[in-house]
Image (tube, helix red, strand yellow):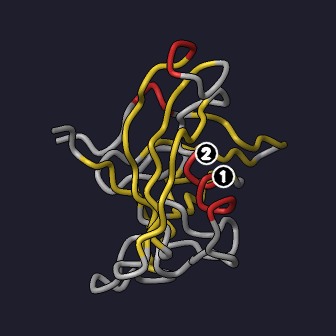
Amino acid sequence: MEFYERDSWQIIEESNETIVLSMNNVSIGGKDRIEFIKGQGTTEMIFYRANSPYPDRPTSKRTVRNSDYKTINSEKLNPVDPSLPPYADNPFESFTEEATFSYLKKKDLGEDVFARFYVYNHKQNFFEFVLVKGKTTVEEDSEFIGIYRVFEDKLIVEVPKG
């Protein structure tokens, strides 16, 4: 099983001997980042799990020998607590409709996405959005995308159709 969409790789930073790539993580959602820093004889690869603060919280680091591309050192930097949801280390500063919708729009849905309707669920602490794509939220001018729940820990769940 592949956890990354190969066509989702993007260069988000590039300078002299450093390049940072971002890619969709289809396993847990969000975007992973890998920073490559090329040195004289080695290249450091610094990994950031989906939606962890970049560059503040790298998950692991590998040192690869440039001559034969072999990993010569590997270390965990900020281990992930498996009992926590994927985004628990980076919650919303302000858990509001505006903040959660803005965060949801960054999930490769595009700029012409609107919330036709939203509701806040007090018992389970999430916002639920009915999303449409188009020029306006008017039904004739838009296309239904889906229903999404955004939790305070930044977990996004698409509500199954039906």
Residue 11 located left or right of residue 160: right
**Are the two marked residues, 1 and 2, in contact with CB atoms closer than 8 angstroms?**
yes
Q: Which residue is mark 1?
A: 102
Residue named by callout 2: 106
Residue 83 lies, with reference to residue 20, above or below; the image says below
The residue at 49%/67% (across/down) is 154
Outermost residue, top side: 140
- Which x, y percent locates residue 155? 42, 65
Estimate the x, y position of residue 136 in percent, counting from the top left.
Answer: 65, 23
Vertical comparison of 30 with 131: above or below: below
Residue occupying image coordinates x 29% and y 45%: 3
Against 159, residue 91 (above or below) is below
Q: Specify few, some or many for label 2: CA neighbours under 10 Å numbering under 14, 14-19, or 20 or more.
A: few
Q: Secondary structure at mark 2?
A: loop
Three-letter residue code for mark 1: Ser
Residue nearer the viewer, 94 or 132? 132
